[in-house]
Amino acid sequence: MKTIGVIGGSTTFATEEYYKAINHGIRQRLGGHHTAEIIINSMDFAKSAHFVENGLWEEGSEFLHGKALSLQRAGADFIICVSNTWHRCADQFMNGIDIPLLHIVDPTAKAIAEGGYKKVALLGTMVTMSEPFLKERFEQFGLEIVVPTADAQSVINTIIFEELSKGEVREESRKVSRGCG
């Protein structure tokens, strides 16, 4: 079994969901008492948010490069990053790392295509929705990506940073998010 290196902490809740989903998949595939071999290097969300909110991509990339390097040194066979937003500079933070990054879009796009979908909504932080880095990669898989209006993107971004990052999910926010795609 390969050892998965996880760059986590882009909220503790996202990292927790990845951990659960990976182990659920291993149990489904291998049965018995099997669990995944995972190394998590978690970042302080406040630091991550500071980099994102202030457009400090170079500093953030250097920070994440250190996370990736420590996962490599710890014995990970490949890396996943639980943050859609930080994939904006994946090439930069993986520069000089000798193990691969499993890009967040690749398995997602494969699952979308296998489900027979051709057009999907992309929701996430303002950066994720407004910049082309994920949309263009999805399009390489033949998918059409739609994003909400700029006003709706702002609302969703606020929900992510003010609610979801704190583990809160308000019913009103669910309704707003459902209407944005």
Image (spheres, rainbow, N blue to C red):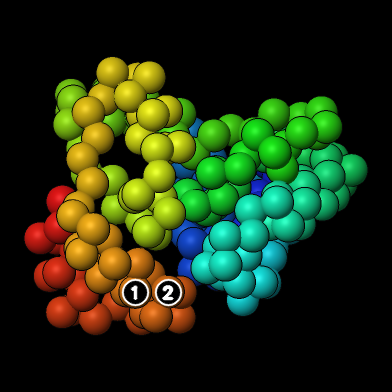
Q: Residues within 10 Å of mark 2 (few under 14, many from 20)?
A: few
Residue shown at the point (70%, 38%) measured from the top left? 92
Q: Which mark is residue 34?
A: none
Residue shown at the point (26%, 25%) measured from the top left? 143
Distance, label 1 to label 2, CA atoms, is: 5 Å
Identify the image quadrant of the N terminus.
top right
Side of 135 relative to 38 (left or right): left
Residue sitting nearer the eye, 145 or 6? 145
* For residue 43, above or below residue 87: below
Residue assigned mark 1: 158
Q: Quadrant of residue 169?
A: bottom left
Q: Amino acid at mark 2?
A: Phe
Residue 84: image location, x then y, percent: 47, 49
Q: Is residue 142 visible?
A: yes
Residue 107: image location, x then y, percent: 44, 31
> How many marks do you count on the picture?
2
Q: Amino acid at mark 1?
A: Thr
Side of 171 relative to 17 (left or right): left
Residue shown at the point (61%, 43%) measured from the top left? 89
Residue sitting nearer the eye, 8 or 127? 127
Residue assigned mark 2: 161
